[in-house]
Image: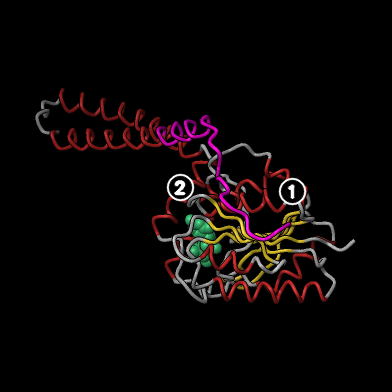
Amino acid sequence: MPLRVYFVIPCFNEEEMLPFTIQKMGEKLQSLIEKELISDKSKVVFVDDGSRDRTWDLIKAAAEDKRFLGVKLSRNCGHQNALMAGMSYAVKFADCIITLDADLQDDINVIDEFIQKYKEGYEIVYGVRSSRKTDTFFKRFTAEGFYKLMKAFGVEIVFNHADYRLMSKRAVQYLLQFEERNLFLRGMIPLIGLKSTVVYYERLERVAGKTKYPLKKMLSFAFEGITSFSVKPIKYITTAGFLMFLLSFLILIYAIVQKLRGQAVTGWTSLTISIWFIGGLQLVALGLIGEYIGKIYKEVKRRPLYFIEEIAGDE
Ligand code: UDP
Ligand code: MG
């Protein structure tokens, strides 16, 4: 039985990019079908993540063609939630799902290799960037720094892998069993286990439109990733606090000695510095703890991740 592959593509204000993406994905689908790598029932699912431009109109028009489907979310829920929405929809019909970005920065020529790996028995295939030549120095620096930081914090993620990957039906079903609200798919998917592998590709340049991940979103995504997956920051703070505590004993002894030697009144400077330093440290610690409490708060509410407003195309 030929393989039924569904592609899931989240789109947020991608009107400039979509005509190109729809065209390219249509061609790719066609060529994969002709090579008999996938069944002719395979489809591309575009998830409109609450775009404010013509994105949904373009998707709806594309969905006239039976190879394309559209899922419209009721508002902007973010990249990760949009991916979840698309996957939970597609998993009902697909044998395996490939997720990729609407800008096609992730080279679609390696899809054949993804499918090859699946046929060899791998249930999760991670697309990994072999180089970041086309990224700006800033993006490369921050992105790679982020992966290293995650690693230092003990989070198991695949280096330089974004959300370009293939998952078997079963792997997606397992992923859907995660109940958490703060989604960070790159951290969650390795937790599924199953036989997995990586495929390398060159990251291309965005053909049209601009990044939907401005610095602010990028930072909050990185922060989300760390605090959703690691409690190490709290541990570091505890260690630092403990060291400070020990240090304060030494300072105490020093202060007493100075006092006995009749050299007390000086010391205003060191005192002020200590107050500020410890005050700052405490604030950092409090803020961090607050961050985790905020997470717990969000989790216990069990809010739905997204709402589907409309579906275009028929299944
Ligand atoms: N995206 C989304 N919702 C958002 C932000 C982004 O669905 O709130 C989509 C976007 O349309 C694109 C993908 O996520 O398909 C990745 O975004 P982008 O290419 O802008 O990120 P970058 O490649 O610059 O990291
Ligand atoms: Mg991109």
| Residue 145 showing in the rendered view | no
Quadrant housing the N terminus: bottom right
Q: Is residue 184 left or right of residue 167?
A: left
Q: In the rendered view, would you say 152 is above or below 160?
A: above
Label 2: which secondary element: helix
Which one is closest to the eye, mark 2 or mark 1? Answer: 1
Q: Is residue 74 magenta?
A: no
- Numbered circle sitting on residue 223: 2
Return the residue nearer the eye: 210 or 15: 15
| C-alpha gap between disc 2 and disc 1 | 26 Å
Q: Is residue 297 magenta?
A: yes
Q: Which residue is denoted by mark 1 in the rendering?
A: 171
Spot occupied by residue 261 in the image (x, y as percentages of width and height):
14, 26
Q: Which amino acid is tagged 1?
A: Ala
Q: Residues within 10 Å of mark 2 (few under 14, many from 20)?
A: some
Q: Position of residue 100 (x, y in %)?
A: 62, 63
Q: Residue at x 49, y 55 (%)?
A: 50
- Whether residue 55 is visible: yes
User: How far from the left and from the top, in percent, is residue 151?
Assistant: 56, 50
- In the displayed orientation, state which residue is furthest to the right: 1
Q: Please, is residue 309 above or below residue 207 in the view?
A: above
Work out whether mark 2 precedes mark 1 in sequence or the reverse, and give the earlier one. Answer: 1
Mark 1, Cα crowd under 10 Å, few <14 / some 14-19 / many 20+, is: many
Q: Quadrant of the C terminus?
A: bottom right
Magenta stretch in the rendered image: 289-315
